[in-house]
Amino acid sequence: MPGRLRITQVKSTISHIARNRATIKALGLHGIGSTVEVADNEATRGMARQVRFLVTVEEISDTSNKEKAK
């Protein structure tokens, strides 16, 4: 699974269990609209799946990153 994932928080963690809040924090998200790009591996996919009702996930291909660098 090479590549990266773009994860965006779309809902608040208010009134959600502490485990969900901790997962959002571990992903590096800080609030609604916050976006991070993380490595595409089993661990990050598992965290994103655990809070899938709070975030959106997009796959980023390596070619798009190379184009941005130019």
Image (tube, rainbow, N blue to C red):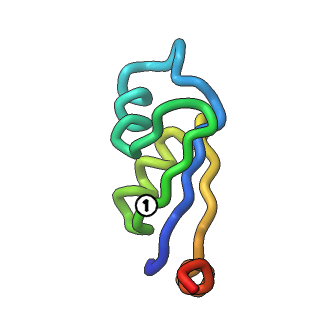
- Viewer can see residue 53: no
Q: Could you say which is closer to the camera, residue 47 or residue 39?
A: 39
Tally of numbered tags? 1
Q: Could you say which is closer to the camera, residue 24 or residue 47?
A: 24
| Label 1 secondary element | strand
Residue 39 falls in image quadrant: bottom left
Crowdedness near tag 1: few (<14), some (14–19) or many (≥20) residues, C-alpha within 10 Å: some
Image quarter (top left, top right, bottom left or bottom right) of the C terminus? bottom right
- Which amino acid is tagged 1? Val
- On the image, the x and y values in percent for residue 30 come to 47, 33
Q: In the rendered image, which residue does mark 1 sit on?
A: 38
Q: Is 35 placed above or below 64 here?
A: above
- On the image, the x and y values in percent for residue 16 come to 50, 19
Image quarter (top left, top right, bottom left or bottom right) of the N terminus? bottom left
- On the image, the x and y values in percent for residue 15 come to 53, 13
Name the residue at 42% across, 27% down. Answer: 21
- On the image, the x and y values in percent for residue 5 come to 52, 63
Name the residue at 55% across, 52% down. Answer: 7
Name the residue at 43% across, 19% down. Answer: 17
Q: Could you say which is closer to the camera, residue 67 or residue 15?
A: 67
Q: Which residue sits furthest top? A: 15
Name the residue at 46% across, 39% down. Answer: 29
